[in-house]
Amino acid sequence: MRKIIFESLLHGPLTEPSPGADSAALAEVGAALARVARKRFGRSLAIREVDAGSCNGCELEIHALNNAFYDIERFGLRFVASPRHADVLLVTGPITKNMRQALERTWLATPDPKWVVAVGDCAFDGGMFAGSYACVGGVSSVVAVDLHIRGCPPKPIDLIRGLLALVEHGGVTRGTN
Ligand code: SF4
């Protein structure tokens, strides 16, 4: 124990310095998103995340939206536990055959009007899992998609920019494919 204390005094903390360069961009994009969401909905935007076969890389970036740095609740976005309370379905993964029905049922349980956002290259067209016997393909092969956010995985700031584009210009999902 004494050795650990001594070494930590000598070498200082091993944590990474907090990000600073794009914090201004984050604040700007987040504030714009909060403004548009309040104007269009009169309340915060409710998001239900659906992992439909992802490797969980996209989930790590989505989870980061709730950490102390991104903290998207301050911009009027919140994740909800049930699709019945959601405005937006954030779907990841190449849609495995096992998850196809779950995605369809989640889509049906989400009240209209609703938006579907496909997150990551796998959700776009199957990505590196395209052609696998276990996968159906991109999200659009199961439900109508309003927005694709590409990347493997996309960064949290890209997710926020995508959601801003969605609430500013997005349409309303009308039916399953
Ligand atoms: S897009 Fe990349 S990070 Fe996201 S689920 Fe596919 S392989 Fe994983």
Image (tube, rainbow, N blue to C red):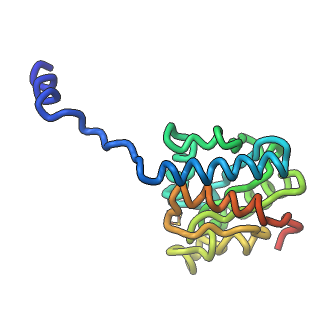
The residue at the point 56 percent across, 78 percent down is: 130
Q: Is residue 79 visible?
A: no
Q: Depth check: 58 or 26 in front? A: 26
Q: In this view, does 177 lie above or below 32?
A: below
The residue at the point 84 percent across, 52 percent down is: 40
Q: Depth check: 127 or 174 in front? A: 174
Q: Quadrant of the N terminus?
A: top left
Furthest toward the bottom, the residue is 131
Please state the horizontal and vertical placement of residue 34, each as a whole percent of the image.
71, 47
The residue at the point 68 percent across, 58 percent down is: 163
Q: In which quarter of the image is the C terminus?
A: bottom right
Q: Is residue 19 visible?
A: yes
Please state the horizontal and vertical placement of residue 44, each as a whole percent of the image.
76, 42
Q: In the drawing, does residue 17 fall left or right of residue 158?
A: left
Q: In this view, does 20 lie above or below 10?
A: below
The residue at the point 83 percent across, 49 percent down is: 39
Q: In the drawing, does residue 59 fall left or right of residue 136?
A: left
Please state the horizontal and vertical placement of residue 24, each as a whole percent of the image.
51, 50
